[in-house]
Amino acid sequence: AGQTVKVNYTGRFGYGVFQTDATKNVIFDSSFGSGTLTFVPGTGNLIPGFEEGILKMRVGEKAALVLPSKIAYGTNGNSTIPPNSPLYFEVEVVGVL
Protein backbone atom coordinates (compact mmCIF):
# COMPACT_ATOMS: atom_id res chain seq x y z
CA ALA A 1 0.00 0.00 0.00
CA GLY A 2 1.16 3.51 -0.73
CA GLN A 3 3.37 2.56 -3.69
CA THR A 4 2.43 3.22 -7.30
CA VAL A 5 1.78 -0.08 -9.08
CA LYS A 6 1.60 -0.87 -12.80
CA VAL A 7 -0.68 -3.75 -13.81
CA ASN A 8 -2.06 -5.38 -16.91
CA TYR A 9 -5.56 -6.78 -16.56
CA THR A 10 -8.57 -8.16 -18.36
CA GLY A 11 -11.98 -7.88 -16.70
CA ARG A 12 -14.79 -10.28 -17.52
CA PHE A 13 -18.28 -10.71 -16.18
CA GLY A 14 -17.98 -13.48 -13.60
CA TYR A 15 -21.14 -15.27 -14.56
CA GLY A 16 -19.58 -16.18 -17.93
CA VAL A 17 -16.14 -17.26 -16.72
CA PHE A 18 -16.87 -20.93 -16.36
CA GLN A 19 -19.06 -21.21 -19.46
CA THR A 20 -17.83 -23.24 -22.41
CA ASP A 21 -19.67 -20.89 -24.76
CA ALA A 22 -17.15 -18.12 -25.56
CA THR A 23 -19.95 -15.61 -26.27
CA LYS A 24 -20.87 -15.65 -22.58
CA ASN A 25 -17.28 -14.91 -21.50
CA VAL A 26 -17.76 -11.18 -22.03
CA ILE A 27 -14.76 -8.88 -21.59
CA PHE A 28 -15.84 -5.48 -20.27
CA ASP A 29 -12.37 -3.90 -19.95
CA SER A 30 -8.72 -4.69 -20.63
CA SER A 31 -5.34 -2.99 -20.48
CA PHE A 32 -3.52 -5.69 -22.46
CA GLY A 33 -2.45 -4.20 -25.76
CA SER A 34 -3.41 -0.66 -24.74
CA GLY A 35 -0.92 0.02 -21.95
CA THR A 36 -0.79 -0.64 -18.26
CA LEU A 37 -3.03 0.64 -15.48
CA THR A 38 -1.05 2.71 -12.98
CA PHE A 39 -2.54 3.37 -9.54
CA VAL A 40 -1.83 3.44 -5.81
CA PRO A 41 -3.53 0.49 -4.08
CA GLY A 42 -5.18 1.17 -0.77
CA THR A 43 -6.42 4.64 -1.71
CA GLY A 44 -9.95 3.53 -2.61
CA ASN A 45 -9.75 4.77 -6.21
CA LEU A 46 -10.63 1.33 -7.64
CA ILE A 47 -13.10 -1.34 -6.58
CA PRO A 48 -12.16 -2.89 -3.21
CA GLY A 49 -11.66 -6.47 -4.45
CA PHE A 50 -9.27 -5.40 -7.22
CA GLU A 51 -7.14 -3.35 -4.83
CA GLU A 52 -7.16 -6.12 -2.22
CA GLY A 53 -6.00 -8.68 -4.78
CA ILE A 54 -3.19 -6.49 -6.10
CA LEU A 55 -1.95 -5.79 -2.54
CA LYS A 56 -1.29 -9.54 -2.13
CA MET A 57 0.86 -9.77 -5.25
CA ARG A 58 4.49 -9.10 -6.16
CA VAL A 59 6.08 -7.77 -9.33
CA GLY A 60 5.99 -10.40 -12.07
CA GLU A 61 3.12 -12.38 -10.57
CA LYS A 62 -0.05 -13.22 -12.45
CA ALA A 63 -3.35 -14.09 -10.79
CA ALA A 64 -7.04 -14.65 -11.37
CA LEU A 65 -9.29 -12.58 -9.12
CA VAL A 66 -12.87 -13.75 -8.70
CA LEU A 67 -14.85 -10.95 -7.07
CA PRO A 68 -18.36 -11.29 -5.70
CA SER A 69 -20.43 -8.17 -6.38
CA LYS A 70 -20.09 -7.10 -2.73
CA ILE A 71 -16.38 -6.23 -3.28
CA ALA A 72 -16.86 -5.10 -6.87
CA TYR A 73 -19.61 -2.62 -7.90
CA GLY A 74 -22.26 -3.95 -5.50
CA THR A 75 -25.97 -3.29 -5.79
CA ASN A 76 -25.48 -0.06 -7.75
CA GLY A 77 -23.29 -1.23 -10.63
CA ASN A 78 -22.07 1.52 -12.94
CA SER A 79 -22.57 2.56 -16.56
CA THR A 80 -20.88 -0.64 -17.83
CA ILE A 81 -21.42 -3.13 -15.01
CA PRO A 82 -24.98 -4.23 -14.10
CA PRO A 83 -25.94 -4.26 -10.40
CA ASN A 84 -24.97 -7.38 -8.39
CA SER A 85 -22.48 -8.60 -11.02
CA PRO A 86 -19.67 -10.91 -9.93
CA LEU A 87 -16.47 -10.08 -11.81
CA TYR A 88 -13.40 -12.04 -12.93
CA PHE A 89 -10.02 -10.40 -13.56
CA GLU A 90 -6.82 -11.80 -15.00
CA VAL A 91 -4.07 -9.56 -13.61
CA GLU A 92 -0.32 -9.21 -13.90
CA VAL A 93 1.79 -6.87 -11.76
CA VAL A 94 4.43 -5.48 -14.13
CA GLY A 95 6.08 -2.88 -11.93
CA VAL A 96 6.23 -0.79 -8.79
CA LEU A 97 7.34 2.83 -9.00
Image: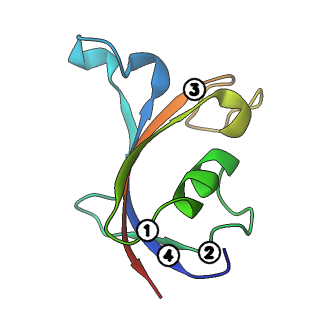
- Residue topped by disc 1: 58
Q: Dot 3, how many residues are within 10 Å of its Cα: few (below 14), some (14-19), or many (20+)? A: many
- Residue topped by disc 4: 5
Asked if marks 1 and 3 touch (Cβ < 8 Å), the reply is: no
Amino acid of disc 1: Arg
The residue shown at (31%, 69%) is 35
Rendering coords of residue 31 (x, y %): 35, 58
Residue 97 appears left or right of 36: right
Amino acid of disc 4: Val
Amino acid of disc 2: Val
Question: Circle 1 — which element?
Answer: loop
Q: Earlier in the sequence, mark 4 or mark 2?
A: 4
Q: Dot 2, how many residues are within 10 Å of its Cα: few (below 14), some (14-19), or many (20+)? A: some
The numbered dot on residue 40 is: 2
Asked if marks 4 and 2 touch (Cβ < 8 Å), the reply is: yes
Q: Earlier in the sequence, mark 3 or mark 2?
A: 2
The residue shown at (61%, 26%) is 82
Asked if marks 4 and 1 touch (Cβ < 8 Å), the reply is: no
Residue 12 appears left or right of 33: right
Q: CA distance from mark 4 to mark 1?
A: 10 Å
Rendering coords of residue 34 (x, y %): 28, 64
* Residue 58 in view here: yes
Q: Is residue 13 above or below residue 49?
A: above
Rendering coords of residue 24 (x, y %): 33, 16
* Residue 73 in view here: no
The numbered dot on residue 86 is: 3
The residue shown at (62%, 74%) is 40
